[in-house]
Amino acid sequence: MSTSTKIANKPALVVGIALILVAILTAYDASTMNIRSGYGVGPNATSYLVAGILAILGFSHLPVALKRMDGDVPSADWKAVGLVGLALASLIICIAMGGGFVLGSALLFAFTARAFGRTRFIADFAIGVVIGFLIFLLFNKLLSLSLPVGPLERLF
Amino acid sequence: MEVFSLLIDGFSGALTPMNLLFAAIGVFLGTAVGVLPGIGPALTVALLLPITFRMDPAGSLIMFAGIYYGGMYGGSTTAILLNTPGEAASVVTAVEGNQMARQGRGGPALATAAIGSFVAALVATIGLAFLSPYMVKVAVRFGPWDYFGLMLIAFVTVSATFGASPLRGLTSLAVGLWLGLIGIDQLTGQARLTYGVPQLLDGIEVTTLAVGIFALGECLFVASRNLIAPEKPIPVKGSVWMSREDWKRSWKPWLRGTAIGFPIGALPAGGAEVPTFLSYNIERKLATKPEEFGHGAIEGVAGPEAANNASAAGTLIPLLTLGLPTSATAAVMLAGFQQYNIQPGPLLFAQHADLVWALIASLFIANVMLLVLNLPLVGLWVKLLAIPLPWLYAGILVFATMGTIAANPSVVELLLLVGFGLLGFLMRRYDYPIAPAIVGLILGPLAELALRRSLQISQGDPMILFQHWSSATMIGIAVIALIVPYLFKGLSRMGADED
């Protein structure tokens, strides 16, 4: 844990500051609204209310940040988290670049399996392609929902 | 009585081959996701929403209800054989159930859980059928101020009463309320917090939040914790049937668990895990052999399992009659109704009577199906636990993102999904509950509508909320529920995470 004596619970401090920032953002957004309601309260009243709740909760986090945490935050395997992030990023990039659903899903499957300790990337990628094709055929042929089409899907 | 003829009509609607098939798919999927770690009924319904968008409303709602009931059955299997509860309502079951399995009494533990769930769901569904018409009669007289009061109670009980700490629960709720602000205001057309992004004008989809925060969040969290080796399931040895003594020791806890679970589920009191804790404590106090508790007492499995199923059925009363979801699964099911432009509430029973009664009838059918699926076929479900974790979670992610890609194939929507996944991961890591955020997102805009309609009627005077005794009482209850946990610190320690 940190050696700092003043702030014993850094996550609580971060959450508190984040909540206050979101509250300011929300209140500013409400102040720029120009549509007014004829009766009762306008749409910005709810924004101010939520901003107020967020601010109260944010300031309530600050005294918590000075106290010691009840339990330690568990240690994390950041490499694995990063791999899942890479898996999701490769899916989004694949969809955005027109690579299609099957390729994106296969990359997602293979990288995620790797994050959970699998080492046979090519085999997992192949499984991902098969699953992706099965879902694609089910969706596009049976349920008439359209999944994004890329070079692999055009073969069918 | 009128209810009987309505129920008979309901059965004739539910017993068509298509609806029976949907119920069967629902209970099958529900049991599977209940057994598998990492996915619960709320996530499963959220994943299926985009797929069922074009299907018949009655069929898919029957399927969702089957998933809901099935998830409650399936969770007990994992809790007993693996000591890792598939969902939060089974946390207590794991305490005694896993001890029983270790002593070679896994069979009777599974049996008392399944039969107890059946008895509880049967009694509670009868309660649902008979109480709902009365609730509707009360609810048609509700004004917007009453709805606002009810929603306040739901907000407070879901987030503050039984969470790890009220501050964390309320923070989670506020995140949901804030997300609910995004998009076009329903009354005036004013855009809020959209920053010129056209995809945000329609607001945040409940399914995107639920799938991101549950599936992606859970996956990231498990990946970060996968350094620890997973537990191996304990094989079921000997007979799955219960002895005469097991029956004798089980039937009272079943009924007591039902009596505790149903009212707590039916009131907007939040969560299926609360009644399981209460039931466990009561059974421990009443037990003839209290020394067995902690070492595999069958009462400690029978009572809580009945309680969680009864509360699941009870939750459907405020959902169907008031449009008020009090759990994450109920919130996602409300989104399921809304995608067909069906708004649950008192009018549902007038405008879609055939659909509601077919749904209630199909709950009875699903319950019978679940008993069959869970007693003789329990070995099949245990095999599901043999799927290697890397493939299980990789598969969950493929299915999770697939729903979003099919419904709304935009990069913005996928980025939102990943953002919510990151949020879910951080909330799990720093121990913030998740259900309040989902309930906040779906109930927030409804509460806003109720509040602003009240203020329109009163021409801006907020005292209208206190001039009606009904809404004043409900706001009072909400305030008391917010303060009580600070008075009884011990009570709030009971909390666990949610489904």
Image (cartoon, coloured by chain):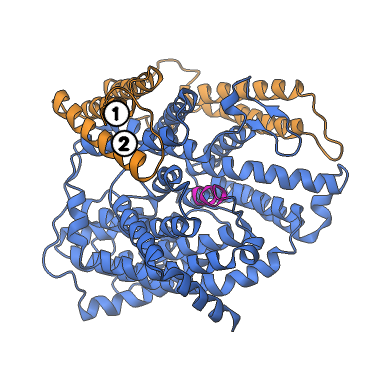
Chain colours: A orange, B blue
* Residue numbers of the magenta segment: B332-340
- In terms of depth relative to the viewer, which is nearer, A65 or B132? B132
- In terms of depth relative to the viewer, which is nearer, A52 or A89? A89
Give x and y (percent) for residue B365: 39, 70
Asked if residue A6 can be seen in this view, the reply is yes
| Left/right of residue B261 with respect to residue A62 in the rendered view | left
Give x and y (percent) for residue B127: 52, 73
Which numbered disc, 2 or 1, marks the residue closer to the eye? 1
- Is B333 inside the magenta-drawn segment? yes
Which chain does tag 2 point to? A
Most distant residue in the left direction: B238
| Residue drawn where x is 47% and y is 32% of the image | B408
| Residue drawn where x is 49% and y is 60% of the image | B58
For disc 2, the marked residue is A136
Look at the picture and state if A45 lies above or below B253. Answer: above
Of callouts 2 and 1, which one flags the residue occurring earlier in the amino acid sequence?
Answer: 2
Mark 1 neighbour class, 10 Å CA radius: few under 14, some 14 to 19, many 20 or more: some
Q: What element carries label 1?
A: helix
| Residue drawn where x is 60% and y is 47% of the image | B155
Identify the amino acid type marked 2. Phe
Mark 2 neighbour class, 10 Å CA radius: few under 14, some 14 to 19, many 20 or more: many
Q: Are marks 2 and 1 in contact (CB under 8 Å)?
A: yes
Look at the picture and state if A80 lies above or below B490. Answer: above
